[in-house]
Amino acid sequence: MVKFNINNLDIWFGDLQVLKSVSMKIMRNEILSVIGPANSGKTTFIRMLNRMNDLQSNFKMTGSVKLEQENINKLDVENLRKRVGMVFALPLPLPLSIFDNVAYGVKMHGLKNKSATSDVVERSLKQAYLWDEVKDRLGESAFKLSGGQQQRLCIARTLAVEPEVILFDEPCSGLDPISTAKVEDAMLKLKVNYTIVLVTNNVKQAARVGDRTAFFLSGELIELDNTDKIFTAPSDQRTDGYIRGKFG
């Protein structure tokens, strides 16, 4: 089933056109890897899916972006961002305890029951593969966690509000290989219940976790196909050149 249906999407920031005539579908319960060199439009694309680009005053878009059957520009933006959560490149824990970081979103959305909140925190930390490492220190400051743990904490905070889609914008760019492997393992298990879009500059990571891969170049969607095909027999020589490291 189609989760996002994108047709003829053009995006500008002022006079600069960043995305050009992008049309594609994102399927439910898949991991879509999005790759491409710097300034290819990857981050603008992923930020469009939960309207983060709206925060810039010179942003303009044309075309159609539907979350299932609903035009995202007609949805309440707060509700959209609850349904489509985002994990950023740099972990951004709140200046609160580990427990309160995860509980923050559900409390903001009105959950008051302490027992129910504790259940949400435990479930989310388990889904983010962090529970066993922090279950005895939930009252400690989140800033005492390592960088990799902070990133998984941010994943848990996103999961707590039960989104339908999780957007990952280069979530492992500052992490060591062990932490990266834990985040990737979490993604692979989360796709059973969530749709995941992963922007990454690491083509090997895209190959490891993506069901399908989209290659962007200079604001255009060059190719979108099953990840195995993209990495073994791409249809466009530019895709092949990027994957082989000839540019980017």
Image: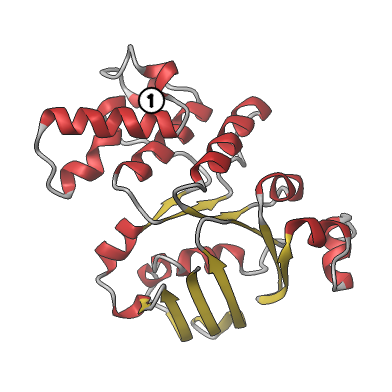
Q: Which residue is mark 1?
A: 143
Q: Is residue 43 above or below residue 21?
A: above
Mark 1 Cα within 10 Å, few/some/many (few <14, many 20+)? some
163 horizontally vs 60: left or right: left
Measuring 49% from the left and 43% from the top, which residue is drawn there? 190
The quarter of the image holding the C terminus is bottom right
Disc 1 residue type? Phe
- Camera sees residue 95: no
Name the quadrant containing residue 143. Answer: top left
Measuring 24% from the left and 71% from the top, which residue is drawn there? 76
Residue 73 appears at what percent x and percent y? 34, 79
Residue 2 appears at what percent x and percent y? 50, 70
Nearest the camera: 246 or 229?
Answer: 229
Residue 28 appears at what percent x and percent y? 50, 61
Scheme of image coloration: secondary structure
Measuring 28% from the left and 74% from the top, which residue is drawn there? 75
Residue 133 appears at what percent x and percent y? 44, 17
Outermost residue toward the top in this view: 136
130 horizontally vs 186: left or right: left
Measuring 49% from the left and 23% from the top, which residue is drawn there? 146
Disc 1 secondary structure class: helix
